[in-house]
Amino acid sequence: MNAGSASATLSAEAAGGTAADAGHPLVALVGPPNSGKSTLFNNLTGLRQKVANYPGVTVERRSGVADSDAGPVEVIDLPGVLGLSPRSADQMITRNALLGELEGMRRPDAVVLVLDATRLRSHLMVAEPVLGLGLPTLVVLTMADELDRRDGALRSARLSHDLGVEVALVNARDAGTLEPVRRFLTALHTGGEEARACPIVAAADHLEGHPSGRSLPVIDVFAARRERARELGRSAGFKAPRPSRFTNRLDGLVLHRVWGPVVFAAVVGLVFQAIFTWAVPLMDGTEALIGASGAYLSGALPDTWFRALLIDGVWAGVGSVLVFLPQILILFFFIAIMEDSGYMARAAVIADRLMHKVGLQGKSFLPLLSAYACAIPAIMSARTVEDERDRIATVFIAPFMTCSARLPVYALLIAAFIPAGPLLGPFLGRRTAVLIGLYALGLLAAVGTAALLKSTLLRGRSMPFVMELPPYRWPSARSIGTRLLDRTKIFLRRAGKVILAVTVVLWVLAQFPRTPAGAPPEIGDSALGRMGQVVEPAIEPLGFDWRVGIGLVTSLAAREVIVGTLGTIYGVETENDEDFELRAALQQDLDFGAAVALLIFFVFALQCMSTVAVMRRETGGWRWPILQFCYMLALAYIGAWAANALL
């Protein structure tokens, strides 16, 4: 799965203003998924990279600046594709970018085509349409160390002769093997021989929808490219590496019909146990730092409205959310390890058995898995699902998967109302079990909804699931670190924009109307309190008061905003009490049944207007987003009401 995964809360602000605007060469990285392309991108650009969306679409764009001996070069990491036919959003983006038809981006000056040397025959099928574009191209064959270790063979010089461009055999993780790539980047400045285009450009006619007007039937194009790739492999003396004994032995366990699901359940249990154990010291340190800095500022600033806004509003609101950053990073740490090690593809194969039972194809699993990070990139990556009915069903159920924005809400309420302690000795604690139960409840709702849709509105037969399983590899510390840094930036950007804006507005509403003496009103009598009291009758059957009602409304911007909202409300109510704790305040105002009801409400409700907006774009209208929002809201209300009534 493409690292992609990242959050679609980012806008298209990086469409311009890149290094290319300063006259630097622009190089596109192209290649199949799991070819080592993103690893090469990270190695070339380091920390000088940014993530945004392509103009007008929700597909992720990653760009960065690489150094060469002659000057900087902008590098853009295009989505991983198996061809350039516009059959999916990823292929459309890559194709249009290479043809110079993508809004907000000029045509690249050159291409680095990244292929996995251990899977050369299948990956070479991408070479013909890319080389046929007539751009200066360097073919980079990654996994050189693995090819050698597993007794594979390849004559890169012969392949270079046959393709008409330079071919470099490298290890994308080892910067010492990337000298051919840097020479190629330098040649873009100096006009050296390395930066040459393939002399054979007729292959461009095979591009479906290419401006040349020539278009062959898809099956004929595929067969021709497969045969050409086979010939190139033979000519280059390609010897496929022997199967990895370690991979085969481990797959015997993780893909076993019985033990495979057991291993998967154990991995999930480890992840959630770590969220409530490993994160505790980091969360305590973050909380202490926020508290100490708030106390310092409170003592250093004069007693004015600005100090009240800063301490009671910003520090209480934004700080309440920042405390949960360690837990979110631990979740993404494990996801990155599973992706980079190759286990994620195995998890997709295991899940495929369940997917077919509810009428979906196995390709739906990877978008749904990415929804544990954020539903928006999950909805966007569902474009790889070719069957339209399956794609709509995948998009519809993606928000049921427990995204990282729900984690602060779950962690706050679980810590406040579920006592700590072991459930299965040292292997599973009570709080971990509750967290797993909430994730499982969302998954069951997704599965049930998919089955309902595929038997009614989206009835149809699912397509078979085919996936190439990569060998197991040690995760790259650099790659994982880069992704965690990206996730931290995204979280802080959201806290710095959405949550900060909401907390400031809430604090202002809590100060008015002023009393005759000019003092702030009691919060229940303020404009904020009165707004909450308007909502309260509708949520009172769920056990919620007006404070929670305000949180439910503000969390439509982003789910975790409810934590900042409650932090601001209680921060104002306690009048800057240094001993204020949000968990203790919630324990006073919510009973156990209401707390469980609030958890269940957040399991089901679509508290994210960004998701609704992306859903409208992906489905081409408001019909499906409105149905999705109302359906999930109804489930949330009924589930919360039942929990409060029973408990």
Image (tube, grey):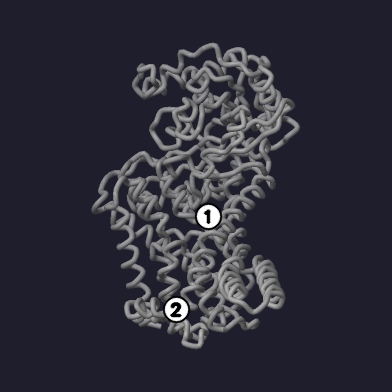
Task: Please give the label number shown on residue 259.
Answer: 1
Q: Nearer the viewer, residue 155 or 494?
A: 494
The residue lying furthest to the bottom in this view is 517
Q: Secondary structure at mark 1?
A: helix
Asked if marks 1 and 2 touch (Cβ < 8 Å), the reply is no
Residue 495: where, in percent of width, then height?
56, 61
Q: Amino acid at mark 1?
A: Trp
Residue 226: where, in percent of width, then height?
46, 22
Query: Which mark sits nearer the N-terminus, 1 or 2?
Result: 1
Which image quadrant is residue 166 in? top right
Q: Residue at x 42, y 70 (%)?
A: 552
- Above-or-below relation of 334 to 546: above
- Above-or-below relation of 629 to 156: below
Q: Nearer the viewer, residue 29 or 452?
A: 29
Q: Residues within 10 Å of mark 1 (few under 14, many from 20)?
A: few
Q: According to the image, label 2 marks what residue?
A: 547
Q: Secondary structure at mark 2?
A: helix
Q: Nearer the viewer, residue 504 or 587?
A: 504
- Above-or-below relation of 125 to 346: above
Give the foreground label among 1 and 2.
2
Q: Amino acid at mark 2?
A: Arg
Q: Is residue 422 visible?
A: no
Query: Can you say which quadrant of the picture contains the C terminus?
Result: bottom left
Q: Nearer the viewer, residue 102 or 380?
A: 102
Residue 345: where, in percent of width, then height?
52, 45
Q: Residue at x 53, y 24 (%)?
A: 124
